[in-house]
Image (cartoon, coloured by chain):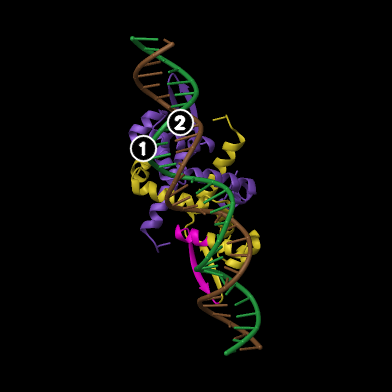
Chain colours: A purple, B yellow, C brown, D green
Amino acid sequence: METPLENTLTTKAATPAGLQAAAFVAKALADENRLRIILSLTQGKKSVSRIVEELGISQPLVSHHLKELKRALLVNVERSGPFIYYELADQRIMTILMDLTGLATDLLTNRTAF
Amino acid sequence: METPLENTLTTKAATPAGLQAAAFVAKALADENRLRIILSLTQGKKSVSRIVEELGISQPLVSHHLKELKRALLVNVERSGPFIYYELADQRIMTILMDLTGLATDLLTNRTAF
DNA sequence: CAAACATATAAACATTTACTTATTCGATAT
DNA sequence: ATATCGAATAAGTAAATGTTTATATGTTTG
């Protein structure tokens, strides 16, 4: 079945509920530390302490941001002994992060070319 | 040239500047009213008053959000007589909005399927 | 049980942000 | 010039958010 962009937008995004959901997820992506966490989780399931080590930000702050990501349903949580592992809830999160970064860098680099 | 997802992430997103830029753009997308404006501009260049009519939100609020979108380089502005027209600065914004909405609705609908 | 470790939560604070109401600026037309 | 229309800005406020420091919860091990 053919689904041109224009069509997909009017059928999936145009609904208030769709936009509200999108804004909710976008809020979760609207912080550099959370994007760094997401990028880190791109490599697979990781414990909180592992993320803390890799990113060099405080443990309570990492916990807080993980809570936000969980609230936005972007990560799944799993306990194993004293460790708690977080993983990305959906592969598309990586794609969106990639697209977002590509667009953002292009916009900043090439200010008038579009 | 082949660019698998994993590769693209590590070359385009992994840089602090890339993530910072992505977070900046994500902030601009993290509001339902701004997403409604973007969706509206999907149909093409529009004046402020036109957006106000279509979305039913106050003129100062629309102006404020347009200012934010412009700050994030997501829209271009053009004056024509007494009217000021805004248009999307890049076509990829539509794609990202679509992907974001698709992901968000799936996450909210299907809470455990992934 | 106590000590040690992993993680979450609480409290407090500063900053940002969305929104409203009121006013100003800019352009056009009479 | 002045009135009118489109759009931006100012001022003010309430709410949300990111961060730090301190404390609590939960799990394992001696």
Q: Front-most of B6 and A37? A: A37
Above or below, B44 against C11 in this view is below
In which quadrant will I find the C terminus of chain A? bottom left
Q: Is B71 inside the magenta-drawn segment?
A: yes
Where is residue A101 shown, x and y percent of the image? 41, 48
Q: Compared to B9, does D8 lie above or below?
A: below
Instruction: Examine the structure image and report whether residue A84 is included in the region drawn in magenta.
Output: no
Q: What is the C-alpha distance between the residues marked 2 and 1? A: 18 Å
Query: Contact, CB < 8 Å: mark 2 with mark 1?
Result: no
**Nearer the camera: disc 2 or disc 1:** 1
Taking the spot 35% from the left edge, 37% from the top edge, the residue there is A55
* Residue D19 found in image quarter: top left
Give coordinates of residue B91: x percent, y percent.
49, 56
Q: Tell which of C3 and D5 is nearer to you.
A: C3
Element on which disc 2 rests = strand
Range of the magenta residues? B66-81
Chain where mark 2 sits: A
Q: What label sits on residue A57 in the rendered view?
A: 1
**SS at mark 1 in the image:** loop
Instruction: Please indicate, yes or no, whether residue B3 appears anywhere in the rendered image.
Output: no
| Relative image position of residue B114 (x, y in whole percent) | 54, 30
Residue type highlighted by circle 2:
Glu
Label 1: how many Cα within 10 Å (few below 14, some 14–19, many 20+):
few
